[in-house]
Image: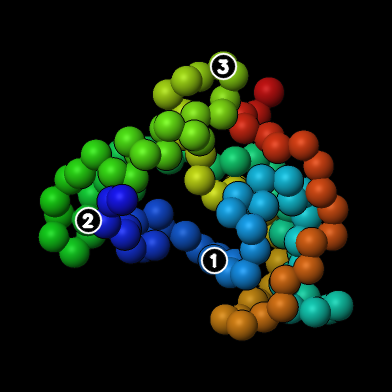
Amino acid sequence: GRDPIDMARFRPNVVIRGTRPFEEDTWRAIRIGGTRGTVLHLVKGCPRCKQSCTDQRTGERHVEPLETLATFRALNPRSAEDVYFGQNAVPQGEGGTIHVGDAVEVLTRGEPIWDAE
């Protein structure tokens, strides 16, 4: 195996734990924070750039994680160079405040979207 990579290399805004790997690919809308929580619409997969190959603490550049992700996450039929990890999401309405530890509910599911048409 390869050495673990710090999650910060992916620059996430929200990290959801306790799901199957890549389960979020089929989520279309989620609510974070209970019945009065914030609804997020997951609009498409997030293609990763070379920035995720840079260690933010040291500035060192590596081939990982893109080299490994490219072996099974190059999912855009229109671009073999796009490697996906995570989802782009937009809040419904004005959004709201979410907190670490808030419950996450999947509201709708659908086919994965890898690129805007």
Q: Secondary structure at mark 3?
A: loop
Badge 1 or badge 2: first in the primary sequence: 1
Question: Label 3, on which residue?
Answer: 78
Q: Residues within 10 Å of mark 3 (few under 14, many from 20)?
A: few
Residue 15 tag number: 1
Task: Residue at 33%, 36% (x, y): give it.
Answer: 67
Q: How far apart are the two marked residues, 1 and 3, measured between alpha carbons?
A: 28 Å
The answer to whether residue 6 of the structure is visible from this angle is: yes
Badge 3 or badge 2: first in the primary sequence: 2
Residue 79 tag number: none
Q: Residues within 10 Å of mark 2 (few under 14, many from 20)?
A: some
Q: Position of residue 16 (x, y in %)?
A: 59, 67
Task: Residue at 85%, 53% (x, y): give it.
Answer: 108
Q: Secondary structure at mark 1?
A: loop
**Amino acid at the residue labelled 1:** Val
Badge 1 or badge 3: first in the primary sequence: 1
Task: Residue at 39%, 62% (x, y): give it.
Answer: 7
**Amino acid at the residue labelled 2:** Asp
- Whether 68 is drawn above or below 23: the answer is above
Q: Considering the image in quadrants, where does the C terminus appear?
A: top right
Image quadrant where residue 100 sits: bottom right
- Whether 81 is drawn above or below 18: the answer is above
Residue 55 tag number: 2
Q: How far apart are the two marked residues, 3 and 2, measured between alpha carbons?
A: 29 Å
Q: Are marks 1 and 3 in contact (CB under 8 Å)?
A: no
- Whether 63 is drawn above or below 10: the answer is above
Task: Residue at 59%, 54% (x, y): give it.
Answer: 21
Image quadrant where residue 103 sits: bottom right
Q: Secondary structure at mark 2?
A: loop
Q: Residues within 10 Å of mark 1 (few under 14, many from 20)?
A: few
Q: Position of residue 37 (x, y in %)?
A: 77, 75
